[in-house]
Image (tube, rainbow, N blue to C red):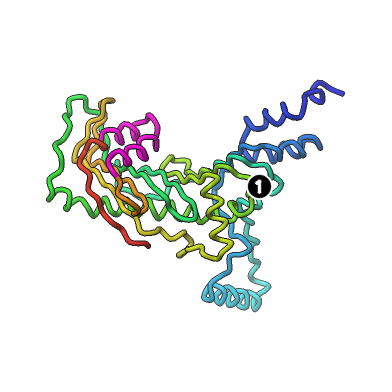
Amino acid sequence: MDAFDAIPDPVVIDILNKVRDVKTLIRCRSVSKRFNSLATESGSLLLQLDQIGESDSEKDSTITSFFRSLFKSVNGLFPIFSKPAKPARILTPVQILAGFNRIRNLDVEFDGGDFKLEKGAAVKWKAEFGESLKSCVIVAFRSATVNTSAIDGDAETDSEFVSSLKTRVVWTISALMAASTRHYQMRDLVKEHKEMEKLTVRDRDGEGTVVMDAAGMKEYRETEARGDEKVSRERTVVPNVRMSMRNAPSLKLESGICLEAATLVVVRLPSGVASDADDAELATGAFGDCMYGEAVAALLKRRRNVLEMNSF
């Protein structure tokens, strides 16, 4: 017996939990029988995805099926001149995580963000889901510059707010659609891994984050089991929501960064009356101590405009 074999299994599993990366752990499984059994015991995993594969339950539309069968027929008429390449198979998250049955915390990371913005603009969001959207915090701005001499801009007038409202609503809707799409893409994973306590889905650009806790995932499974799941065009339907929107034409942060057309939107279900304190509780911890967290703290001091948005 070598020195490694003398290490207790719980210690090896704790080391593998520090590794986290699913691709690395899958490679570890081929090292030995012991690694094969212990790698799947990891409870904290990071799954990095370039693309999302289509699950077996997803069916082609009638039009897609028609054209696919048509092209197959045409291809069969010219077997000498056409040798179709076999497309690479893209695995679904459920297929990749096959064998990992003790997942407690799972981070899923996509290749890139969802927004195509004008140069200098940025949108950052964090959404919490159960069966559907529970809340979302969105921070956006048109440009950011380092200017220690800049002064904080005055509060927006009503006319300025209305003139810039279209852009801010577009930012908000785009963030909600991106969040609901990611939630939809994780549906099979949530149904399959009932042992999960927390699921976090983000992109490598750090643009947006979807979070589901144990209660939210249980709520989703129960809804799906009843057949009440609401989806639309490859995403979860966004319910009726109430938005608290705060804006600043020019916002100087304590770090010396000046944000132009800065916006904070706090989205929640329209139950009860949300106060400034409720908004602060939800938004303050969304982005940590980075520039976006600093922007949240500054924008929470601005006047709040409340808007209602219908389900879409």
Q: Number of labelled discs?
A: 1
Q: Is residue 86 visible?
A: yes
Looking at the rendered structure, the kind of residue marked 1 is: Leu
Residue located 22% across and 35% down the image? 251
Q: Which residues are magenta?
A: 275-298
Residue located 81% across and 21% down the image? 3
Answer left or right for 279 relative to 214: left
Quarter of the image where one finds residue 106: top right
Q: Is residue 284 magenta?
A: yes
Residue located 24% across and 50% down the image? 306
Q: Main secondary structure of the magenta part?
A: helix
Residue 202 image point, x, y percent: 48, 43
Farthest right residue in view: 1
Residue 65 image point, x, y percent: 57, 74
- Mark 1 surroundings: few (<14), some (14-19) or many (≥20) residues within 10 A: some
The residue that mark 1 highlights is: 97
Quarter of the image where one finds residue 46: top right
Q: Is residue 281 magenta?
A: yes
Residue 48 image point, x, y percent: 56, 43
Picture quarter with the N terminus: top right
Eyeballing the image, is 71 above or below 225?
below
Answer left or right for 312 relative to 189: left
Eyeballing the image, is 232 above or below 217?
below
Dot 1 falls on a residue whose secondary structure is loop
Farthest top residue in view: 3
Residue 32 image point, x, y percent: 80, 35
Residue placed most toward the observer, 136 or 152: 136
Picture quarter with the C terminus: bottom left
Eyeballing the image, is 163 above or below 123?
below
Residue placed most toward the observer, 229 or 184: 229
Q: Is residue 110 visible?
A: no
Answer left or right for 131 relative to 309: right
